[in-house]
Amino acid sequence: MHATVPLRTSDVELSAEDVLHDPYLALRDIREAGPCGTADRLTTPGSFPATSTSAAALSDHARFSSAHGVGYEDQFNARMEGTVLVSDPPDQARLRAPLSDKLTSKALAGLRTRIAALADDLATDAVAKGDFDA
């Protein structure tokens, strides 16, 4: 038997300009509100703001499975089925193995210059057009 706790809610708007500019106070308040909850604007519970709670949930595949989807939209989940993102061990480990060495911090740091150059090119092209939709 598992203990249950009331699901707490938060009215913090994570996309609000002031929160985007300085999120730390809002994130602290969310963490202190409890171990699991949902923002009122979301329809599915499942926010685990505390590191220890997140780690426990990420390793408990029986109760917190990714294999049936990780998104809010059924169409997204259906398209992602069987991918690294939407799978549980042992399938996830098998799918992730060929990517692991390419996604380390060291490997990604090597792409920094290339990514910055591509971003500069895109920005230069957008400015040259005089008008663009971001």
Image (tube, rainbow, N blue to C red):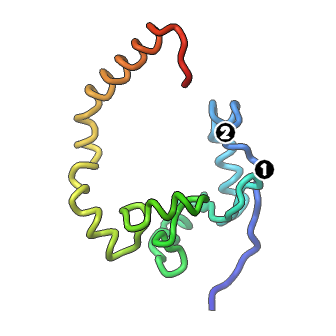
Q: Position of residue 11 (x, y in %)?
A: 78, 50
Residue 44, compared with residue 112, is above or below; it is: below
The answer to which quarter of the image holds residue 108 is: top left
Residue 72, compared with residue 4, is above or below; it is: above
- The residue to which callout 2 is attached is 15
Question: Horizontally, is 18 left or right of 112 in the view?
Answer: right
Q: Position of residue 5 (x, y in %)?
A: 72, 76
Q: Position of residue 58 (x, y in %)?
A: 47, 68
Decide which of 61, 119 is in the foreground and name it.
Answer: 119
Question: Horizontally, is 90 left or right of 50 in the view?
Answer: left
* Residue pictured at 58% horizontal, 63% vertical: 74
Tell me which amino acid carries mark 1.
Asp
- The residue to which callout 1 is attached is 11
Numbered-mark total: 2
Mark seen at residue 89: none
Q: Position of residue 51 (x, y in %)?
A: 53, 60
Residue 75, compared with residue 117, is above or below; it is: below
* Residue pictured at 51% horizontal, 66% vertical: 69
